[in-house]
Image: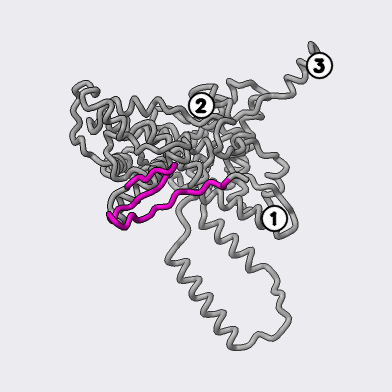
């Protein structure tokens, strides 16, 4: 029976007081036992040995010895001893301002921080000049084995790491060949890696959407209906204001105050037809600068509905219980004063409101498969592509290129069946 593979231990070499690890019968010394540097080197060895099955190589050390400084074409970096930790810190300071919208960091900045976490865990004290393809591959494997990320997420995070080194080259912090070498590392391919796969985002069946609507607050239900009819992004619906909607024609044109590709100079216009207009007309009493869909109104509706529920109690209510109930009401009122509802919904709160409705339906005995607002965009894209073609779907979704629309709009299988009946 073959021996089961185990992870080599981080251990102490008592005569020298150094940390060591034994791999393939060879002792590798890591530095002073218990020091952060020795533990970092240990993680490097484990990550790369898991990937290759051979004796691991510390990221970039051998490459640096083989290439040498002269291979960098005479380009001098500001500090050849710049560590990975220092580089990450400088880059995140830049990213905090660059990946920002209205003075606040966007989700891309959070993604950048998440992408840098394994780099710090494995190579924080290493030199930025020494970071090479083997180090990037070790991080890939670490994301698979230790973090359990999906293949697409791993590829995205590896690209962000490369983006950091590209920025470092532009700032003359590291030589250009460091970034060029990292570009040789290919992304993980489907079926050729042990990384888990995720299911693609598909349209949501309208019957499940219709089944969910009765369990949502009226404001959330109207947001769902408007998004389904227009194909807008969830963020477009949550930030909708009357001053952003041109109502002069029979079809209203909504231009969001901000959108996903605004930084690229792209315009975003959402066409609102008669059905969606009928839904929005209920909110004409809003001020032009106020967001149409109000979380405060939804919360007030929810509390009112809860108050209407009949009490299931059949026994006498004792004075001590009344006092306790009053204390709880006072605490709840105080908490509401400390955290009032936001001025508008955002994408996460919109998503959570829909999930709350699905869970509420399940408690009532109506089982609805989980779905989320962005699937409504896919449903609209598929519908428009089926009836009007890919170019119409591209315009409705606001994509600059049709190949992006292909991701959202499912291909018309019925057309293929029709062709097969006639010519196949």
For marks 3 and 2, give the one nearer the viewer. 3
What is the magenta range? 3-29
The image's mark for residue 115 is: none
The image's mark for residue 421 is: 3
**Rendered location of residue 234, percent (x, y):** 53, 41
- The residue pinned by badge 2 equals 399
**Could you tell which of marks 2 and 1 lies nearer the N-terminus?**
1
Q: Is residue 60 magenta?
A: no
The image's mark for residue 361 is: 1
**Rendered location of residue 43, percent (x, y):** 39, 46
Which residue does the image show at 65% across and 85% down from the upper left?
Answer: 317
Q: Is label 3 in a helix, a strand or a loop? A: helix
**Rendered location of residue 95, percent (x, y):** 32, 40
Which one is in front, 310 or 185?
A: 185
**Could you tell which of marks 3 and 2 lies nearer the N-terminus?**
2
Which one is in front, 140 or 343?
A: 140
The answer to whether mark 2 and mark 1 are in CB contact below 8 A is: no
Q: CA distance from mark 3 to mark 2?
A: 33 Å
């Amino acid at each position: 029976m073959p021996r089961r593979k185990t992870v080599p231990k981080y251990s102490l070499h008592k005569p020298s007081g150094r940390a060591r690890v034994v791999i393939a019968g060879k002792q590798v010394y890591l530095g002073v036992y218990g020091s952060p540097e020795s533990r970092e080197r240990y993680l490097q060895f484990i990550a790369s040995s898991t990937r290759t099955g051979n004796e691991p190589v510390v990221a970039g050390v051998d490459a640096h010895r083989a290439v040498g400084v002269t291979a960098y074409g005479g380009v001098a970096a500001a500090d050849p001893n710049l560590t990975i930790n220092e580089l990450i810190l400088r880059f995140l300071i830049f990213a905090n301002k660059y990946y920002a919208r209205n003075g606040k960091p966007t989700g891309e900045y959070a993604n950048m921080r998440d992408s840098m976490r394994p780099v710090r865990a494995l190579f924080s004290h290493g030199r930025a000049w020494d970071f090479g393809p083997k180090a990037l591959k070790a991080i890939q494997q670490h994301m698979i084995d230790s973090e359990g990320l999906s293949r697409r997420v791993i590829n995205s995070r590896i690209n962000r790491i490369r983006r950091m080194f590209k920025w470092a080259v532009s700032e003359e912090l590291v030589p250009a060949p460091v970034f060029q070498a990292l570009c040789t590392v290919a992304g993980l391919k489907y079926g050729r890696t042990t990384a888990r796969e995720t299911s693609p985002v598909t349209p949501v069946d309208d019957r499940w959407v219709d089944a969910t609507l009765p369990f949502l607050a009226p404001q959330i239900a109207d947001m769902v209906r408007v998004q389904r009819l227009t194909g807008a992004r969830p963020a477009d619906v949550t930030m909708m204001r009357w001053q952003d909607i041109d109502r002069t024609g029979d079809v209203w044109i909504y231009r969001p105050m901000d959108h996903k590709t605004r930084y690229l100079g792209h315009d975003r216009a959402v066409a609102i037809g008669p059905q969606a207009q009928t839904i929005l007309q209920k909110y004409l009493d809003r001020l032009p600068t106020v967001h149409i869909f109000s979380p405060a109104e939804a919360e007030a509706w929810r509390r009112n509905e809860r108050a209407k529920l009949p009490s299931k109690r059949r026994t006498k209510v004792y004075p001590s219980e009344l006092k306790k109930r009053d204390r709880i009401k006072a605490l709840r009122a105080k908490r509401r004063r400390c955290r009032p509802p936001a001025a508008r919904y955002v994408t996460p709160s919109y998503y959570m409101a829909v999930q709350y409705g699905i869970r509420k339906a399940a408690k009532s005995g109506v089982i609805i498969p989980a779905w989320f607002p962005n699937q409504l965009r896919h449903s609209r894209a598929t519908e428009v592509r089926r009836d009007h073609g890919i170019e119409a779907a591209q315009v409705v979704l606001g994509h600059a290129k049709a190949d992006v629309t292909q991701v959202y709009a499912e291909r018309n299988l019925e057309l293929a069946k029709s062709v097969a009946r006639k010519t196949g």
